[in-house]
Amino acid sequence: MSETTARAAESMRTAHDTAEYDVPSYAEWDRAQPYATWASARARTAVQPVPPGMGGSRPGHHVLRYAEAEEVLRDPETFSSRINMEHIGQFHGEMIVGMDGAEHRAYRNLVAHAFRASKLEHWGPDLIEPVITDLLDRIAPLGKADLVADVTGRYPVQVILTIAGVPRDDHERFAVWAEHLNLGPLDPPRGFAAKDAMRAYLKPIIEARRAQPTGDLISEIVHAEIPGPNGAMEKLPDERIYGFLGLLLPAGAETTFRAMGNCLYALLTHPEALARVYADRSLLHNAVEETLRWESSVTMVSRVATRDTVVGGCPIAAGAPVGVITASCNRDEARYENPDEWDLDRPLGNLMTFGTGPHQCLGMHLARLELRAGLSAILDRLPNLRLDPAVAHPEIVGYPFRGPATLPVLFG
C-alpha cells in the first residue's frame, strides 16, 4: 500500500466513525436486524470502512450503495472472489464462487446450461409442481399450519434434490446439512461435521452415476470434461465434484426456502395486497420481485481487492476484504422511492439480490420459478390465508441470511 493511499485510507476511517457502524458478532447473526445500521451508514458514504474484529480479521470495507456495488461486482480483475474459499469454502469445498477468470468460466459453463430460463420450463410440471402439491395435500384439510415448518422448509430442498438425482425422501437430513454448512462460521465443528456427512452420503451416488449415468445433474457433473493443464479434456477430480454439489445443493435449499418465507411474510402482513394477488395471479410476479428487493434471503457477497484502488471516493488497499451488502443496495434511496416499504405496485427494475457480473447467481431463474409456482399453489389450495392471531407475530431476522423462523397461519 502506497504512503499516499495509506494516508487517504486513514483519513476515511477518521471521517466515518466506525463505532456507529455495528457489525454483529457471529453469535448474534441469527437474530440481527441490520437495516437501520446500513441505512445510517449509506446516508453518509457509499463505502464504509470496517476495522478488524467487525466482520473479519483484516481491515475491510462494506459497499452499501447500488452504483458502487455494480462497479465492484463487474470488475473481477480488481475484486477477486477467491476470498470465499477462506470462510464458506472451508465448509462447502472447492466451489465456483471462489474461482476467478478462465477457471471460473470453464467450471460455471459446465452447469450453466441446466439453469437457463428456457431449460427450466419443463421442470415446472415435471419436478416442481408435484413437490408442492404433495406438501399442500398434507395440510390443506387442517385449517392451520406453520408455513415454514410444513412448506417452505421442505419445498426448495426437495426440488433441488430431485433435479440433482438424490432421493427426495432424504430431504430432512439435507435441510439440516444445508443450514449447518451455510452457517459454518457460527459453529465450525458443526459445519465440518455436516460437510463430512454430506460427502459420505453422496459418495455412493456419485460412484453409481460414474458407472451408469441417468441424465440427472449429478450424472452431468460426474461426466463433464474441461481442458486440463496440457489442453486435453479431463473429467473433474472428486474434490471439484464435491465442491460443486456442496454449493449447489445447500444453496438451492437454504436460500430459496428463506426467500419463499419472506414472500409469504410480505403478503400476510399486507392483507390488501394479498387479496389482490388472490384475485389476479399475474401480480405474483410483482410480489416476488418486490420481496426479492425488500428482503433478500442472502444479504451480502464477499470480494478481496487485488490492488490499491478507490471506490466511491474511498481508498481500498490491496488485500482488503470487501463485502458488497446487496440488501443495502436494494434499499438505496438514490434508486428506489420509499425503499423500506414493500409496495406491490413498485415499477419493476434490476435488483442486486442475485448479484451482477460474472458471478451472478446461477440459480436465479430456478429460484424465481420455484417462488412463483409455490406461491400460486399455496393460494390455490389455502383460501383466506391469514396470520394466526393466537400465536406471536412472526418477524424476519438475520444478518447474512434473512427469513422468518415461523409463519403460523389459518386458512379456509
Image (cartoon, rainbow, N blue to C red):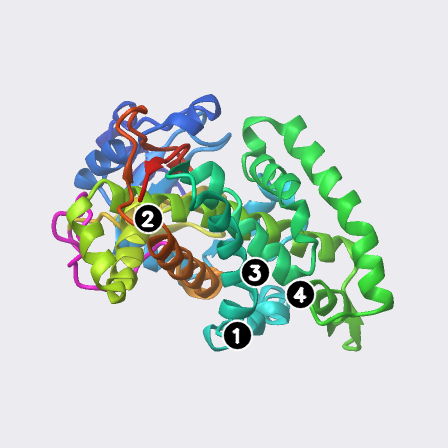
| Kind of residue sitting beneath label 1 | His
**Quick one: label 2, few (<14), some, or many (20+) residues within 10 Å?**
many
Residue at image coords 29%, 22%: 19
Magenta segment: does it hold 340?
Answer: yes
Compare marks 3 and 4 and give the one earlier in the sequence. Answer: 3
Q: Real-space Cα distance between discs 1 and 2?
A: 24 Å
Secondary element under disc 3, as helix, strand or loop, is: loop
Residue 283 in the image: x percent, y percent?
A: 24, 63
Residue 181 in the image: x percent, y percent?
A: 60, 38
Residue that extends furthest to the left in the rendered view of this protein: 337
| Kind of residue sitting beneath label 4 | Leu
Q: Real-space Cα distance between discs 1 and 3?
A: 32 Å
Position of residue 40 in the picture relative to residue 52 (left or right)? left
- Looking at the image, which is closer to me, 214 or 29? 214
Q: Real-space Cα distance between discs 3 and 4?
A: 23 Å
Residue at image coords 32%, 42%: 411
- Looking at the image, which is closer to me, 175 or 379? 379
- Which residues lie in the magenta part? 334-353
| Kind of residue sitting beneath label 2 | Cys
Secondary element under disc 1, as helix, strand or loop, is: loop
Residue at image coords 76%, 70%: 214
Name the disc covering residue 301, or none.
none
Above-or-below relation of 217 to 340: below
Position of residue 242 in the picture relative to residue 292 (left or right)? right
